[in-house]
């Protein structure tokens, strides 16, 4: 790849040489050796480069030269001696080359570098021309061995005990390396560099310094210094040190200087200068840098780096270290002097001269110190020749050159910081004129200037003349240069041939230049057209309006005009703006839905490739203003805002006012309106601000078109602090569950009202019992406080005050009262029993128990009433609770002496027909007591609640299918379901009809009970009522209104007519949904007559009487439903004498019979194979229970016995829900048939017991003759 690159460079160099003319030139090295590795410490500067390479590695030294010479030759010098590429020193023992030049180039390759290969190399390019012995030299290459020695004692492990807070230095002692290795430290065996910080620093010598040792520096950390030459992959690691840090606390230590870099540094201009100073101490010292004579700090940290140093950086720098226990800061001074490497005043250049002329090369360089210059001629030290060759003021002069004196000049400018190397040639030439480029043909517009060029060269430099015909051109209409002629104000008369003539003392050459003159291009009209304006040079429109610019130009008829549009002087190139597009060859520019960004000057440029004309029109779009600019704060700190700004462009609508918005450090992304000006002034003052807040401000402008975008935010400003304006509100002591604690909360004061730093809340808590007050401080971002009181439900007074660093808000905050946390009551209700004096029903019972005083200390909190609990004795895990709030409890509930101090409570909705257990407990706001004595209760049988989720499943013309689920509470032994229904006429109901459904079988709560109501009228609204009954009587009723379906339109029957030769008749069959059907027959020449009418139980008939052979009969079937009738399509069937054709038919049938039987046998075989494969893949039969489980119905749940009360698990899972009347009216419609009939398959024998279709491939019994034998009607004449 590298060889290809060199070849490419060589080709470019040769191409450059021949670009103008094949002019002989001395060799010149254009691509020399490069430094390796490429790094900031190994730059490509001066007269030599450095290549570091390890032994046994390969290297490549580049050398490519240019020069128009027939014999360009490359040689290499090593340590000043010419390398012999035929000697054994450059070969392997097998006689293959180890050191060789690349073919056609001078690049040197060295394979498997040996000790003897290191040294100084230089490439030399020379010419073997007889008339020139010029030599070009590359920079010298120092080939140096890259090596790194191992650390001594690298396997040792040191252990150091260090007290916490003490200074420590771990030395590196790096081994020898060339070039200098990169040093770092690692904490394990991975050679991953450790991170340094202000406390842990590595100095320039590789030593590791701890300003103070911390406990985290010990443990499993193993410190090792390692050195690396990354570019060759060489690494070596030193001995390992582990730290054992002891002591619980670090002792304070003042800052102390421990290590500094060189204090006097000479910086090289353009390069970096760095200093380091390392301090010890605890706390970790803060290090700062300053330059003497300047007050401000320039940097911080243990290192100061000046990148790209300048002469103005010369001076004294001071490093200062201090910490909180240091008296006077410790200081170290550094002195910087700035010098410079050599640089060319003007880089030396290749020179071409003619025979007899003088050649010069200027090698003037500047630097600090002043560089010295060494000269070489063709690779040899310069020697003066009086009157011929001499040096004056760093310029070499060679006079009176002849053709054989082409020379390569090298100069080397050097000072103590580097060197510059130049390799240029003086090429002596004697060449006749050659015209290399001229204007073969030029078109120009009349009235313009025409420039004809004639580029030429030769040595000596030739002169150039112009002629038109026999006449030599001169005069005021012509301007001449060394390579061109300009003809001013061209007209048609100037069209023709112009000849340029180049000549010198070596010869002459001439070329013809054709000038063609065309009519000039001019724009005749540029118009911007809107609906209301026409023909203006500026147009003003509202935003979102469309604008159309039309440009009309004229040009020479032999040329074609092209249009280009500019906006504000810039060409509209790709029309990427969707609002701007060009049309009609770009002679029309359309701006759609213009906005402010489209305002500006639009220029039409008409161009024919020869000349152009342009015209401009201004578009003014009235839109919202541009955003304000240059917003500056004039005041802020004293709680008053002052701002001034520059108005943005108004976009042709006057600015009405400005809105000032602010954001704060509390949420920089939230902007809030602060102030609105009353006019268009661009300054405000005395706008009130909150105290102690860091603000940013921005401004929006408003005109009749709307608001501008907001301005850029201002810099931050902070207002002066002051005490908070108020104390918090909403203070309250909450009822608290935590015993022994008081919980206080309040409404937060917004950060904008903090008015300063260190905002906080001060709580004063007073125990009412002993009037003892304690204070607590709470952070400003909190709004509650839990306070330990070590008591239970004691009264406290609380005040919450707001404070900041300036002081507390004025006034005394209001005191609020509350109680400390509650505990579990230690008292429980006594003598809980059934009140036998009160009514006792299936769902209602009254209970009494001894009351507990509201203020009893045993309540351990605020009295919150009682709870009666009950559960079935056979299911104690399901407990129902009835809350009895304190507000309904009278002081004494009894009327007699025996009821004094008693609580009486009636409970409704108890589960009927259940064996229950009950108790009662007392509670405070947070906790409940232990329960009272339990009692047993057996509730009598009751009536059910209403059935659940009653809805219409399907509606037909004459029926309604309804469904429901069991009542939530059955309350006894379920006997039956009663369904009543009656027609709804407006607000009246017809006579009620009742159906009953026996319910003495096991029904799961997840089973829907279904019932079909039949004998209904179509399109009629019915009210359906359903209720369940027990032995006690009927339960609650559930009702819905639902409308039957309208009568579906009758469909014409589908008729099949088959000839029956053996019976001399026809078999007519049909498919129809109507209750009855009529078979119609039309004999030739007669009208249709009804042959037979039959109901829907039969759908075929056999016709054999009254038929005449040879005639065609027409059949139809009419569907009849009351007064509605619809007739099928007519079917024409010829009646033939089949006896004469019987023999032929028998043969025909026999053949077809054999074919059909074979086909059936093959089909059966295929079906058997498919079934076997399916059986193998499907496994067991369809499992009904699994299918139900997929729908969320567990078989076990369905079989669960039904509970008599309301504790059934399934009833809890099924929510109470049902259809609204509207939903039921719009419910699903069904036909009068069952589901198989609806899908067109009335033969249940097609399905076996597991729901598959296997039955359709077995024996089937035809229900009619037609079903058994009939093909379709179109095949009747084949049978």
Image: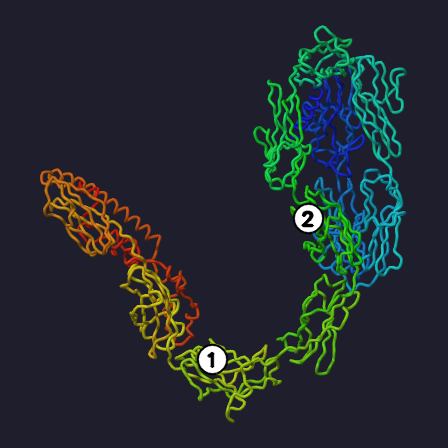
Q: CA distance from mark 1 to mark 2?
A: 72 Å
Asked if labels 2 and 1 touch by Cβ distance under 8 angstroms, the answer is no
User: In which quadrant of the rendered view does residue 3 lie?
Assistant: top right
- Residue 207 in percent (x, y) is at 80, 50
Q: Residues within 10 Å of mark 1 (few under 14, many from 20)?
A: many
Q: Is residue 169 visible?
A: yes
Q: Residue at 87% of width from left, 25% of height from top?
A: 394
Looking at the picture, does residue 514 appear above or below residue 1144?
above
Q: Quadrant of the N terminus?
A: top right
Disc 2 marks which residue?
702
User: In which quadrant of the rendered view does residue 689 lie?
Assistant: bottom right
Which residue sits furthest front? 532
Q: Residue at 81% of width from left, 56% of height from top?
A: 211
Label for residue 870?
1
Looking at the picture, does residue 853 appear above or below residue 1015?
below
Q: Nearer the viewer, residue 887 or 194?
A: 887
- Residue 696 in percent (x, y) is at 73, 53
């Amino acid at each position: 790849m590298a060889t290809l690159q060199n070849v490419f460079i060589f080709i470019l160099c040769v191409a450059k040489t021949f670009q103008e003319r094949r002019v002989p030139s001395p060799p010149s090295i254009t691509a020399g050796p490069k430094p390796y590795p490429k790094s900031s410490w190994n730059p490509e500067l001066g007269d030599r480069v450095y290549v570091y390479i390890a032994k046994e590695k390969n290297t490549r030294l580049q050398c490519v030269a240019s020069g128009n010479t027939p014999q360009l030759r490359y040689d290499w010098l090593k340590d000043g001696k010419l390398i012999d590429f035929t000697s054994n020193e450059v070969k392997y023992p097998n006689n293959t080359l180890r050191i060789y030049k690349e073919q056609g180039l001078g690049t040197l390759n060295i394979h498997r570098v040996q000790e003897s290969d290191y040294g100084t190399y230089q490439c030399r390019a020379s010419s073997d021309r007889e008339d020139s012995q010029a030599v070009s030299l590359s920079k010298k290459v120092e080939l140096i061995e890259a090596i790194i020695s191992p650390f001594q004692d690298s396997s040792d492990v040191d252990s150091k005990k260090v007290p916490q807070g003490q200074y420590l230095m771990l030395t590196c002692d790096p081994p020898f390396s060339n070039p200098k290795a990169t040093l770092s430290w690692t904490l394990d065996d991975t050679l991953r560099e450790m991170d340094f910080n202000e406390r842990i620093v590595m100095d320039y010598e590789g030593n590791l310094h701890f300003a103070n040792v911390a406990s985290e520096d010990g443990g499993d950390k193993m410190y090792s210094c390692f050195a690396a030459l990354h570019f060759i992959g060489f690494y070596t690691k030193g001995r390992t040190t582990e730290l054992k840090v002891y002591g619980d606390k670090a002792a304070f230590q003042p800052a102390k200087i421990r290590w500094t870099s060189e204090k006097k540094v000479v910086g090289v201009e353009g390069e970096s200068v760095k200093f380091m100073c390392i301090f010890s101490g605890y706390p970790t010292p803060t290090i700062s840098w300053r330059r003497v004579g300047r007050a401000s700090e320039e940097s911080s940290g243990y290192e100061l780096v000046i990148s790209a140093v300048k002469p103005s950086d010369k001076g004294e720098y001071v490093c200062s270290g201090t910490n909180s226990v240091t008296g006077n800061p410790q200081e170290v001074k550094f002195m910087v002097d700035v010098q410079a490497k050599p640089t060319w005043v003007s880089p030396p250049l290749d020179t071409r001269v003619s025979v007899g002329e003088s050649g010069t090369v200027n090698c003037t360089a500047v630097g600090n110190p002043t560089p010295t210059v060494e000269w070489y001629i063709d690779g040899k030290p310069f020697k003066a020749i009086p009157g011929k060759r001499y040096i004056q003021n760093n310029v070499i002069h060679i006079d009176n050159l002849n053709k054989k004196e082409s020379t390569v000049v090298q100069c080397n400018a050097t000072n103590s910081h580097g060197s510059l190397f130049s390799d240029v040639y003086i090429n002596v030439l004697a060449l006749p004129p050659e015209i290399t480029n001229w204007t073969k043909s030029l078109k120009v517009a009349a009235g313009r200037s025409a420039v004809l060029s004639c580029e030429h060269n030769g040595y000596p430099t030739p002169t150039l003349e112009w002629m038109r015909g026999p006449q030599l051109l001169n005069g005021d209409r012509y301007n001449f240069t060394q390579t061109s002629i300009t003809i001013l104000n061209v007209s048609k008369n100037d069209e023709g041939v112009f000849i340029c003539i180049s000549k010198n003392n070596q010869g002459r050459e001439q070329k013809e230049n054709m000038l063609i003159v065309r009519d000039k291009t001019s724009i005749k009209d540029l118009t911007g057209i809107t609906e209301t304006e026409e023909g203006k040079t500026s147009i003003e429109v509202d935003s979102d309006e469309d604008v159309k610019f039309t440009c009309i130009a004229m040009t020479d008829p032999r040329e074609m005009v092209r249009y280009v549009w500019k906006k504000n002087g810039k060409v509209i190139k790709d029309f990427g703006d969707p609002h701007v597009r060009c049309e009609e060859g770009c002679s029309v520019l359309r701006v759609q839905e213009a906005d402010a960004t489209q305002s500006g000057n639009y220029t039409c440029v008409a161009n024919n490739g020869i000349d152009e004309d342009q015209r401009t029109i201004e578009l003014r779009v009235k839109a919202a203003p541009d955003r304000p600019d240059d917003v500056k704060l004039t005041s802020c700190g004293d709680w008053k805002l002052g701002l001034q700004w520059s108005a943005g462009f108004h976009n042709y609508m006057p600015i009405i006012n400005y809105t000032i918005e602010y954001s704060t450090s509390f949420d920089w992304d939230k902007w809030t309106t602060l102030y609105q000006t009353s006019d268009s002034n661009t300054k405000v003052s005395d706008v009130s601000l909150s105290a102690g807040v860091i603000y940013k401000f921005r401004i929006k402008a408003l005109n009749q078109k709307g608001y501008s975008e907001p301005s850029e935010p201002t810099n931050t400003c902070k207002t002066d602090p002051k005490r908070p304006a108020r104390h918090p509100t909403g203070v309250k002591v909450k009822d608290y569950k935590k015993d022994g604690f008081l919980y206080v909360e309040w409404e937060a004061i917004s950060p904008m009202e903090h008015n300063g730093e260190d905002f906080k809340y001060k709580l004063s808590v007073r125990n009412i019992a002993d009037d003892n007050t304690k204070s607590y401080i709470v952070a400003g971002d909190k709004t509650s406080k839990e306070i330990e009181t070590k008591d239970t439900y004691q009264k406290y007074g609380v005040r919450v005050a707001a404070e900041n660093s300036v002081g507390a808000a004025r006034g005394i905050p209001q005191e609020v009262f509350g109680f400390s946390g509650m505990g579990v009551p230690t008292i429980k209700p006594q003598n809980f029993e059934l009140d036998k004096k009160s009514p006792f029903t299936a769902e209602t019972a009254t209970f009494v128990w001894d009351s507990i005083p509201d203020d009893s200390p045993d309540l351990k909190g605020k009295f919150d009433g009682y709870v009666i609990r009950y559960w079935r004795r056979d299911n104690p895990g399901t407990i129902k609770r009835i809350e009895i709030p304190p507000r309904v409890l009278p002081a004494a509930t009894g009327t007699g002496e025996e009821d004094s101090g008693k609580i009486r409570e009636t409970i409704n909705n108890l589960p009927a027909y259940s064996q229950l257990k009950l108790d009662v407990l007392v509670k405070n706001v947070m906790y409940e007591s232990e329960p009272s004595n339990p009692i047993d209760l057996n509730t009598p049988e009751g009536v059910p609640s209403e059935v659940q989720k009653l809805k219409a499943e399907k509606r037909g013309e004459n029926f309604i299918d309804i469904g429901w689920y069991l009542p939530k509470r059955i309350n006894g032994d379920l006997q039956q379901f009663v369904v009543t229904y009656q027609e709804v006429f407006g607000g009246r109901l017809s006579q009620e009809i009742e159906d009953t459904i026996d319910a003495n079988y096991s029904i799961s709560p997840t089973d829907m009970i279904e019932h079909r109501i039949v004998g209904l009228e179509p399109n009629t609204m019915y009210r359906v009522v359903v209720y369940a009954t027990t032995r006690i009587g009927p339960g609650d009723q559930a009702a819905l209104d639902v409308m039957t379906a309208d009568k579906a339109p009758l469909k014409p029957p589908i008729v099949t007519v088959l000839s029956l030769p053996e019976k001399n008749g026809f078999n007519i069959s049909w498919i129809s949904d109507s209750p009855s059907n009529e078979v119609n027959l039309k004999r030739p020449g007669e009208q249709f007559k009804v042959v037979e009418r039959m109901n829907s139980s039969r759908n075929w008939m056999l016709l054999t009487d009254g038929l005449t052979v040879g005639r065609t009969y027409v059949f139809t079937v009419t569907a009849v439903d009351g007064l509605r009738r619809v007739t099928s399509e007519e079917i024409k069937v010829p009646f033939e004498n089949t006896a004469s054709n019987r023999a032929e038919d028998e043969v025909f049938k026999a053949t077809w019979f054999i074919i059909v039987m074979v086909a059936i046998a093959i089909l059966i075989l295929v079906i058997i194979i498919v079934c076997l494969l399916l059986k193998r893949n499907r496994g067991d039969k369809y499992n009904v229970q699994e299918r139900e489980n997929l729908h969320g119905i567990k078989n076990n749940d369905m079989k669960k016995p039904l509970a008599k009360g309301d504790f059934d698990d399934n009833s809890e899972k099924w929510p109470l829900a049902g259809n609204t009347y509207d939903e039921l009216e719009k419910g699903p419609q069904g036909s009068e048939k069952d589901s198989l009939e609806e899908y067109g398959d009335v033969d249940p024998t097609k399905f076996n017991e597991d729901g598959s279709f296997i039955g359709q491939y077995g024996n089937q019994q035809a229900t009619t003759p037609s079903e058994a034998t009939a093909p379709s009607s179109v095949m009747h004449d084949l049978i």
